[in-house]
Image (spheres, grey):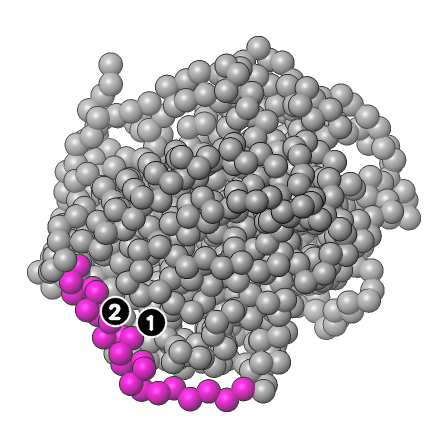
Amino acid sequence: MLTLYTDLLCIGAGLAGERCAVEAAGAGFEVICLSLVPARRSHSCCAQGGMQAALGNCAMGEGDCPDVHFQDTVKGSDWGCDQDVAWLFAETAPVEMRRLAHWGVPWNRVEPGVHTYYKGGKPFEKEELEENRGLIHARAFGGTAKWRTCYASDGTGHSVLYTMDNRAAQLGVQVHDRTEVISLIHDGENCLGAVARSLRTGELVVYLARATLIASGGFGRIYRNSTNAVINDGGAHIAALDTGMVPLGNMEAVQFHPTGIVPTDILVTEGCRGDGGTLLDKDLHRFMPDYEPEKAELASRDVVSRRMTEHMRKGKGVSTPYGDHLWLDIRHLGEKHIRTKLREVDEICQYFLGIDPVNALIPVRPTQHYSMGGVRTNRDGHAYGLTGLFSAGEAACWDMHGFNRLGGNSLAETVVAGGIVGQKIVEYLKGSEVSFPTGVVRDQVARDQERIEALINGENGSENVFDVREAMFDVLEYAAGIYRNGDDLERGVGELQEIHERANRIGLKTSGVGANPELALALKMPGMVRLALCVTYGALLRTESRGSHTREDFPERNDRDWLSRTLATWKDGASLPNLTYEEASPVYTIPPGERGYGGGKIIPRDAAKEEK
Amino acid sequence: MARTLTFKVFRYNPQDPADAPHMDTFVLDETESMTLFIALNRIREEQDASLQFDFCCRAGVCGSCAMVVNGRPTLACHTKTADYPSEITLLPLPFFKLVGDLSVDTGTWFREMYQRVESWIHTDLDFDPNEQEERMENDVANAIYELDRCIECGCCVAACGTARMRQDFLGAVSLNRLARFIIDPRDKRTDAEYFEVIGNDQGIFGCMGLLACEDVCPKELPLQDQLGYLRRKAALTAIGRKGPKNPQLP
């Protein structure tokens, strides 16, 4: 058994993982990043639109400051976020954007002069000042008071990831790609590293580390229809949950993005709407202003996704063999804008839909997109439950997003949180001593090896792994989508418990030799169902509507009973997660109030408790 | 009428001592808007769960799924079966080390490549968190972005005649990478320093000018423009003159 030792083990080599790695390597520590794919293929590369940071350089961003960014973020979260963390984020974001510029990101820059821009399909003019020439420019995104989203065309994630990976290479960060973590090693108090499986050879490798970081992105692939890369299947979340000690926060908070294309669910950026694109129904009527006169297409994602679904339920969707959809119209932005600033969108339309968005409408519908939930950490990024375990980026519930994330805030979070958590990891590494009891390591490896052998030999049964996954997809689709209700959730929880039993009886159809993909899926399948249960059971118990979590039977946002964060742990052998709750924020700098879009009633915090 | 598609797929699991390289045949009914992403996943789920191939973003932006489709390197995710005859032959990319079946190890090669060309900004300026960012003309930023769009899929080196003959050839992707840093005002390397790395047979002089790199690039990067520019600039740098302006710059 190959055993490797390092100071910091980053599980994930996307933006959050590498940003932490860069911080630790810069401080002289040895870092190994594990990645399912070469670092530059991480899902971060898919982020198109940009990163929010209150630089206030451009005309429409004038007067912006971290205060306003903080307010937008708290409102966007529907008061579900940790406000200390949201403030820390908003305050640090501008510095991180400038640091990225220093490292080589080709941000779009301010060009002085009068420019035309579009809002709600109509042209307007703005003037950029000569004194701001060459500073980082920004575009509009949903739920923001100012144009604040820094961007590099619509390949922002790509450019930032490549720059970050360059920086990591320069500092000697090692990336072990094609390596999948299957369990965490811990002694009940300290996290000691992880057991991983090589996706080249199938061999197990032990990584012992003084600090371990989970930065593995989201787990959207527990849903059938998702904008997520196929690697976002929650493997590292499962490893954390399976310790029985590390809680996952707010797993029921699942974001649906308004503009996944039909039928492939590939995302086209919110920048389309930010730059002035509109949503049309089957009659080519622009319907969003009917629901949201103020913000229209630029309300927050949860609101736009709900309104789209509501409108389609009224029969206003375009019917296709793949189900109903609506149209995204960017034609009026013009060929030059589409071929340059929305170039990825242009390519996606041409390659995957066979249409030219310069003169054709884009078929879109809301699709699973982002996991607000994840490994619950404190404001330093330290996971609850185990010393020496950290988390950052989408994998974490740090929690600046609460129950709805604003566009442009997740890509920014990866580097902002990565920088902050990276510094905290450095402090931790400077002050910590760890011992690695060999018995603990040996036991964990033995458990993993037994699981693998049982799957290969079909000792537990002969369930087909793909059938089990399909069954899980079906349940999440009807029970844990955009609209949820008690009956479906209750049925869903019951069915998922049965599916969990089936997942424990999977047997391989193939030999399992080498980098066998069936074995990779089979190893995490029971864990994926556990994640699905955390989502569904959490949603069943949360009897209110907040942000992306919408209960048709409980339409009010209930601050009296639910201004809280769900924490889910899973005890070995249990059939359901154990749910506890904590206060959403340690302080309410902005007291819970209306968001200014999305409507809906609020049961105030100080309302009298009802007799149950 | 829906077609029946026949896929001839290269198979080899190097971890299995009993296995030898061979071709397997799979048959599928074509569905509307079918891509190779859909087809290969269906084959794996319905016919042979051991089939190895790589997808990640499945949206044409991450570069994972490059393979040789009917003789031509391309991204499998955005390859529509409707554009092909009913028999489709799939081979792994040549040049890179085989992981198994259609899966190759691009990560190791690219990591070595960016250590060779030192693919990062070289500057002696320290970052000052209290200062405004250094200004840059938007046209310059856009020009850098154009060359920064490479997704390291490996199609260009897999299609390259020189790369097939000499393993140490840097290939179009590396030359494009260096061109990106040459036009970046933040990078303080001198022209002579750049050409120390690429002014040789492993770099700009190894290219035979077959142009396949640009033909197969799924991001349609101006790879031959960059090669031509680098060659002229190298020649002029060698005789002590200022090189030409990159065609990407305004």
Q: Is residue A93 above or below residue B147?
A: below
Which disc, if any, is residue A195? 1
Q: Would you say the residues marked 1 and 2 are in contact, meaning their CB atoms lie under 8 Å apart?
A: yes
Query: Which residue is located at x 85 percent, y 33 percent?
Result: A126
Farthest left residue?
B18
Q: Which sits in the foreground, B14 or B42?
A: B42
Dot label at residue B29: none
Q: What residue does disc 2 label? A: A448
Mark 1 or 2: the one toward you: 2
Q: Position of residue B58 (x, y in %)?
A: 41, 41
| Residue A440 sits inside the magenta stretch | yes
Q: What's the magenta region? A: A432-456
Going by the numbered disc 2, the residue's amino acid type is Asp
Image position, residue B83 (x, y; %): 34, 25
Picture layout, residue A409 above or below residue A439: above
Tell me the distance, in whole angstroms, between the alpha carbons under discs 1 and 2.
Answer: 8 Å
Queried whether the magenta region covers residue A262, the answer comes back as no
The type of residue carrying mark 1 is Val
Residue A37 relative to residue A599: left or right: left
Quarter of the image for residue B46 reads top left
Which is nearer the eye, A12 or A190? A190
Give the side of residue A525 with respect to residue A291, left or right. left
Label 2 is found on which chain of the structure?
A
Which residue is depicted at the point 38% across and 49% down? A533
